[in-house]
Amino acid sequence: MSDILLEIKDLHAGIEGREILRGVDLTIRRGEVHAIMGPNGAGKSTLSAVLAGRPDYTVTAGSVSYDGRDLLALAPEERAWAGIFLSFQYPVEIPGVSINNFMKAALNARRKAAGQPELKPAEFLRLLKEKMAFVQMKGEFAKRDVNVGFSGGEKKRNEIFQMAMLEPTLSILDETDSGLDVDALRIVADGVNALRTPQTASIVITHYQRLLEYIVPDVVHVLKNGRIVLTGGRELVDRIETQGYDSIDG
Amino acid sequence: MDKTYIIGRDAVPSDIRLAEGESMRLTLFVPEGTDCALDLTVSLDGPGASLDLAGGWRCNGSENVSLKVTVRHNVPGCTSRQLFKGVVGGSARASFDGLVYVAPGAIHTDAVQESRTLLLSDSATAEARPQLEIYADDVKCSHGATTGYLNPEELFYMRSRGIPEAEARAMQVEAFLAPILNRLV
């Protein structure tokens, strides 16, 4: 097993003919947490969308290697089976589909792809209960339609619950802190921290330093105008906090 | 009274009449692969009669589905609730004509009709013609018709969790039809 989990080289990507990422280079090793910070419009969400395989984004140049595979050649579901998880900035409501059925379909599809049998109903239920408790979601949420009528904090907890269910190798948290109060932030961060292992890695995308007080990154990148313009350690977070993004040339 | 008709399997009466105080829960469903030309009239003939009608159709091939439903409020104080949901894919054609008729003197009528279509392909066609004919004052009547496609945001969200595209689409279709399908069991 290689030490390098994700390797992005000179990635150019955009949407509707508009280039947003203009040559991103990024290497992530197993066991690491990387923070990607940047001002609004820098391309943070585009990067997460491209890594998860959102169909409306187009990659125009560059390469992404994940666990030795060409990530860009994989469909979104294949990326999920390979262990990639995106926590959405705006989790999507799915009327008519319960969390229970949603997670059952997701877990069993991945097991099928891995040549494993479906989970027995009792096993699934036990797992569901355990992971809901892990993010302090009430059990009755399992019967509710995915994200329909959830508060902002409940939606984000639901993301981390799904992450706990799927146990990803690479998790990408896109602005998971937006719209969260301190209590919800702590629950989300505790969840993410508890899921850290020496084999897995995380990308934490955020505009603010707040989340990074709870999820401590090993490496911090600043994304500006579609490029990573600065990479450093945790001290970068403090510099951005006191001097702002304008102090960094991009 | 609770009646369910699966089109293509059951014969549907063309004329249903509800007397004073009678209430009926009526469900119609057109399964995949069924052609039909249905013309149904439900008349509310006695005061206080009420109708709860749900209809659904699912076509994904070259079906030709035509539904004409007339609900006649002939006397005062009757209630009708109608919900129609159709999924139209492939090169199928589906048309829905829904008329709510309120006779002269049928005051305090309370009628709601809603029709929703989910289009799955560009070569499918769906038409909905909801109509209200109201000849009495002091009534509450409303209708609404919408046509839409599967939501790409929902699809991507499901796929990002590992649900294959075809299964994600099928789950969305099931969710859309659930209010009708739930009445069949």
Image (spheres, coloured by chain):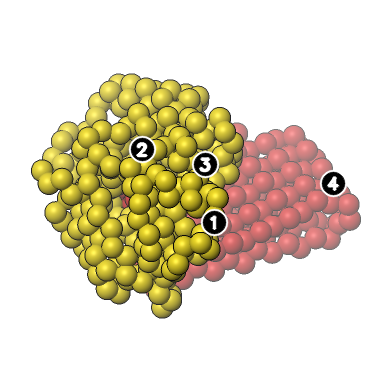
Res B146 seen here: yes
Secondary element at image label 1: loop
Check contact, mark 2 vs mark 1: CB within 8 A: no
In three-dimensional space, the C-alpha distance between marks 2 and 3, rounded to whole angstroms, equals 21 Å
Quadrant in the picture for the C terminus of chain A: bottom left
- Is B96 located above or below residue A172 in the figure? below
Q: Nearer the viewer, mark 3 or mark 4?
A: 3
Instruction: Locate residue B72 relative to residue B122 in the image: left or right.
Output: right
Q: Residue at x 40, y 31 (%)?
A: A191
In three-dimensional space, the C-alpha distance between marks 4 and 1, rounded to whole angstroms, equals 65 Å
Q: Which residue is mark 3?
A: A210
Q: Which residue is mark 2?
A: A163
Q: Nearer the viewer, mark 4 or mark 2?
A: 2
Q: In the image as oriented, which residue stretches furthest toward the bottom?
A: A17
Chain name for mark 2: A
Secondary element at image label 4: loop
Label number found at residue B108: 4
- The numbered mark, 2 or 3, whose residue comes first in the sequence reads 2
